[in-house]
Structure formats: structure tokens, C-alpha cells
Image (tube, grey):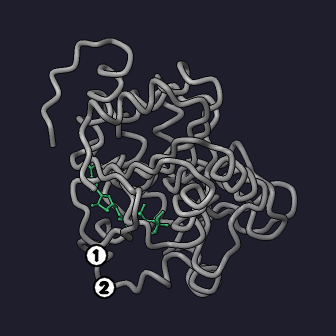
């Protein structure tokens, strides 16, 4: 069912426990291309699996490191958009709030979100491919990839690659928040990649209202009781926050 900013604002203002799942669409208005969209220019000839799997990294570590270094640089220049700020405000206003993201860009934290469950890691961090520890203090101007100062293994981005398990604690926390919430937002995600894709339906099965925020409802899983708020999250989430708490929304009905 297609819903409106005002209806969602009312749900939000009354909700006791809110969980939010975000995907690449939330960062679209910050100019961050999705993984696939970033495969332009010289990268278009590469197989995504070769760029984002332990096997690809083992075969061509320098090439994979360089691809992520380029993406890290472009993410480093990006700024959070009003959608990220709106979610940070919701966290401040709702006592039981959980933000779960599939994004690796760190923009939620930059916008002021304090507790972010990162299901797919964070491209701004690196970890050792051998001992698994997250490492600070690496440089881009020496050997490529740089090596771990403790064990000499290659450093790699701290993101979840094809064929890798999601961080167990993050997944467990995301699952519990989805079971416990009374309102669940699925924002800017195609909801295709498991296990994140199941979270809204877990919430729904356990009695939560589910609101999908996306410019399109095409390709989204449908079900009774799932509400669709159509629009760009940067615009529409600020309208929802305004209508819920500031009462100055100029929102139009979608
Ligand atoms: N506001 C909200 N949603 C938007 C916007 C916007 N401004 N622009 C695009 N979208 C929506 C698209 O309609 C689409 O449904 O964002 C969604 C992006 O979908 P995907 O690119 O599939 O991203 P995501 O769902 O995050 O992918 C999940 O897959 O590629 C892997 O690991 C990667 O974390 C990623 C995971």
C-alpha cells in the first residue's frame, strides 16, 4: 500500500521501538555510486567477484587494494545528506532505536548516528587478511597492499566480500532489533541481498509495521501490511521528521 509522509510521521511519533535498515539508496543523494555503478572506466572490464572476494584478492591483491583505495577516496569526499541527518535525529528522539546498515561508507556516523550496526563492514577501515585484526596507521605510499605491522599479512578493506560471513554480533543484534521493534523502516535498499533482505519480513511476522522508503516499489517484495513511502530518502525522511516533531512539514502526499 502506498502511504504518506503524514501517516508515517504519526506512526513514528507514537512508536516505542524503531528499527531501520538502510542500503545504498540512502547514500545516493550524497553522490556515492553503488558497488555496481562504481564499475565504470577502467574498472568496467573487471568481474565484480574478482574485486570483492577472498579468492580475487589472493589472485590480484594490488589490483583489489587499488580499487578499494579509489572508492575510499571518493567516499572520503562525500558528505552525509538530509536523510542521514534525519535518521540521526530519530535516534535522539526515540528511546529504543536501532540503525542497521548495509552501507560501508560511514556516512551515518558522520551525520551523528551514535550506534550503527554495520552488516557489511566499513570501507574506511582496514584489517589484516591473515590475523583478521582491524588496523590503524597504515600508509598508501609504500608496498601495495600495505602489510600488517604485527604479522606481515596483506591489509585489506574491512568489508564483507562475496562468500564471507557477516559479522556474527552485528547480525545477531540486527535480528533481535527486528524481532523486538514495533516499527521497521527499510530505506534505500533493493532488499535482495540476504540475510539483510529478510529483516523487514522478520519484523512484520512479529507484528511490527513495516515502511519501505524508496523512489520505486518495483522489484520490492510485497505483502499485506507493508507500506510504501515513495520518494528519495534525503527529501522524504526530513519531511517525516518535520511532520513527526517539528510540525512544519511542507510535505505533499505521495
Ligand atoms: N533514496 C532512497 N532509495 C533510493 C534512492 C534514493 N535517493 N536512489 C535509489 N534508491 C533505491 C533503489 O531504488 C534501490 O532499491 O536504493 C536501492 C539500492 O539498491 P542496491 O543498489 O541493490 O543496494 P542495496 O540494497 O544496499 O544492496 C545490498 O548488495 O551490492 C551489495 O554489498 C552490497 O550492501 C550492498 C548489498
* CA neighbours of label 1 inside 10 A, class few (<14), some (14 to 19), many (20+): few
Could you tell me how far apart the alpha carbons at marks 2 and 1 are, in whole angstroms? 6 Å
| Vertical position of residue 42 compared to residue 10: above or below | below
Helix, strand or loop at disc 1? helix
The residue to which callout 1 is attached is 42
| Vertical position of residue 96 compared to residue 141: above or below | above
Rendered location of residue 214, percent (x, y) = 29, 53
| Vertical position of residue 47 compared to residue 34: above or below | below
Rendered location of residue 225, percent (x, y) = 41, 56
The residue depicted at 49 percent of the width and 31 percent of the height is 110
The residue to which callout 2 is attached is 45
The residue depicted at 57 percent of the width and 78 percent of the height is 162
The residue depicted at 53 percent of the width and 63 percent of the height is 201
Q: Is residue 14 left or right of residue 164?
A: left
- Nearest the eye: 238 or 3: 3
Helix, strand or loop at disc 2? helix
Rendered location of residue 98, percent (x, y) = 61, 39
Q: Quadrant of the N terminus?
A: bottom left
- Nearest the eye: 68 or 83: 83
Are the residues flagged by discs 2 and 1 in contact, CB closer than 8 Å? yes
Q: Quadrant of the C terminus?
A: top left
Does ligand 1 reach within 8 Å of label 2's beta carbon? no
Rendered location of residue 152, percent (x, y) = 81, 65
- Nearest the eye: 199 or 144: 199
Does ligand 1 reach within 8 Å of label 1's beta carbon? no
The residue depicted at 61 percent of the width and 35 percent of the height is 17
* CA neighbours of label 2 inside 10 A, class few (<14), some (14 to 19), many (20+): few
Q: Is residue 251 left or right of residue 78?
A: left
Where ligand 1 lies, by quadrant?
bottom left
Amino acid at each position: 500500500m502506498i502511504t504518506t509522509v503524514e501517516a508515517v510521521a504519526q506512526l513514528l511519533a507514537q512508536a516505542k521501538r524503531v528499527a531501520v535498515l538502510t542500503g545504498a539508496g540512502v547514500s545516493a543523494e550524497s553522490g556515492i555510486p553503488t558497488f555496481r555503478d562504481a564499475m565504470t572506466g577502467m574498472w568496467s572490464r573487471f568481474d565484480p567477484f574478482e574485486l570483492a572476494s577472498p579468492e580475487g584478492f589472493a589472485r590480484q591483491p594490488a589490483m583489489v587494494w587499488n580499487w578499494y583505495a579509489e572508492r575510499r577516496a571518493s567516499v572520503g569526499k562525500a558528505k552525509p545528506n538530509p536523510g542521514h541527518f534525519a535518521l540521526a535525529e530519530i535516534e535522539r528522539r526515540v528511546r529504543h532505536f536501532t540503525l542497521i546498515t548495509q552501507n560501508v561508507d560511514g556516512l551515518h556516523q558522520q551525520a551523528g548516528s551514535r550506534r550503527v550496526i554495520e552488516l557489511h563492514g566499513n570501507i574506511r577501515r582496514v584489517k589484516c587478511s591473515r590475523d583478521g585484526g582491524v588496523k590503524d596507521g597504515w600508509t598508501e605510499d609504500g608496498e601495495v597492499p600495505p602489510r600488517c605491522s604485527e604479522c606481515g599479512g596483506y591489509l585489506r578493506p574491512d568489508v564483507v566480500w562475496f562468500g564471507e560471513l557477516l559479522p556474527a554480533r552485528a547480525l545477531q543484534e540486527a535480528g533481535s532489533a527486528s524481532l523486538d521493534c514495533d516499527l521497521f523502516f527499510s530505506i534505500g535498499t533493493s532488499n535482495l541481498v540476504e540475510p539483510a533482505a529478510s529483516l523487514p519480513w522478520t519484523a512484520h511476522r512479529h507484528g511490527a509495521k513495516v515502511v519501505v522508503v524508496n523512489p520505486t516499489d518495483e522489484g520490492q517484495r510485497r505483502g499485506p501490511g507493508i507500506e510504501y513511502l515513495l520518494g528519495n530518502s534525503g527529501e522524504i525522511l526530513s519531511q517525516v521528521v518535520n511532520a513527526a516533531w517539528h510540525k512544519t512539514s511542507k510535505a505533499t502526499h505521495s
